[in-house]
Amino acid sequence: MPEILVLYYSRGGSVARLARQIARGVGEVSGMQARLRSLPPVAPITQTAAPPEPEDGAPYVDKHDLTECAGLLLGSPTRFGNMAAPVKYFVDTLGAEWASGALVGKPAAVFTSTATMHGGQESTLLTMLVPLLHHGCVIAGIPFTESALNTTRSGGTPYGASHVAGVADTPELSEDEAQLARALGRRVAALAKRLQP
């Protein structure tokens, strides 16, 4: 069965909750399933080896996950209006996958979480899309036909799913945020299904 890779880095749990809702949305498309994978943290001073598996949550990604997937959803917390360092570090290691065209023609989308409403959700989502364009992905967003996009008072953008965690870093998603995350998962899975040879 074709799999959609839902790949994320999460520190406070918000991005992981978005990833699980996205995976639910993927599973709502007949004949498609999600493959949840996470990214290890990086050390700011020296590079350290990450354990082979995280203590909890999704297993760490392997580059074969990118080759094997039918589509990709990439998630990161926002750091100063951009993706977090572990996500950028991983993206920067994908030279061989770029050269081989591992992601060419595969649908892709992005998701994020911020501490504040205007903490850079849209700039983070847009900058996360740039490397996916370089990889030849077919970019998907959330269309305004999703009614929650018009009513949300927290996260959710046309550029991707999002969550406002607040200064207390609350990982619990609002109903609109969860609904839009599932919609994004369904959208990428449906596109991947259509694009399958």
Image: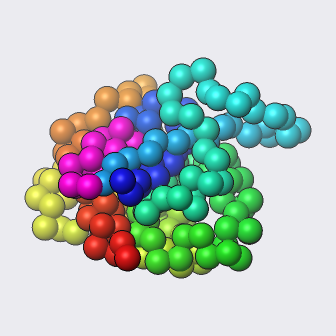
The residue furthest top is: 55
The colour mode here is rainbow
**Where is residue 134 drawn, in percent x and y?**
59, 77
> In the image, is residue 22 part of the stretch drawn in magenta?
yes
Residue 196 x/y as whole percent: 36, 72
Question: Residue drawn at (46%, 52%), measured in percent from left and top?
Answer: 5
State which quadrant residue 192 falls in: bottom left
The residue shown at (33%, 63%) is: 188
| Residue segment shown in magenta | 19-31
Which residue is depicted at the point 57% across and 52% down? 65
Q: Residue at x 60, y 44 (%)?
A: 61
On the picture, is 101 further left or further right than 119? right
The answer to whether 93 appears left or right of 127 in the picture is right
Residue 110 image position (x, y, % from top left): 43, 58
Image quadrant where one finds the C terminus: bottom left
Decide whether the magenta segment is chiefly helix, strand or loop.
helix
Residue 10 highlighted magenta (yes or no): no
Total tally of numbered discs in the picture:
0
Question: Residue 154 occupies which quadrant of the picture?
Answer: top left
Any part of residue 168 in sight: yes
From the viewer's perspective, tell me whether residue 194 is left or right of residue 128.
left
- The answer to whether residue 157 is seen in the rendering is no
Q: Front-most of 25 and 164?
A: 25
Q: Foreground: 19 or 153?
A: 19
Up/down of 141 relative to 77, above or below: below
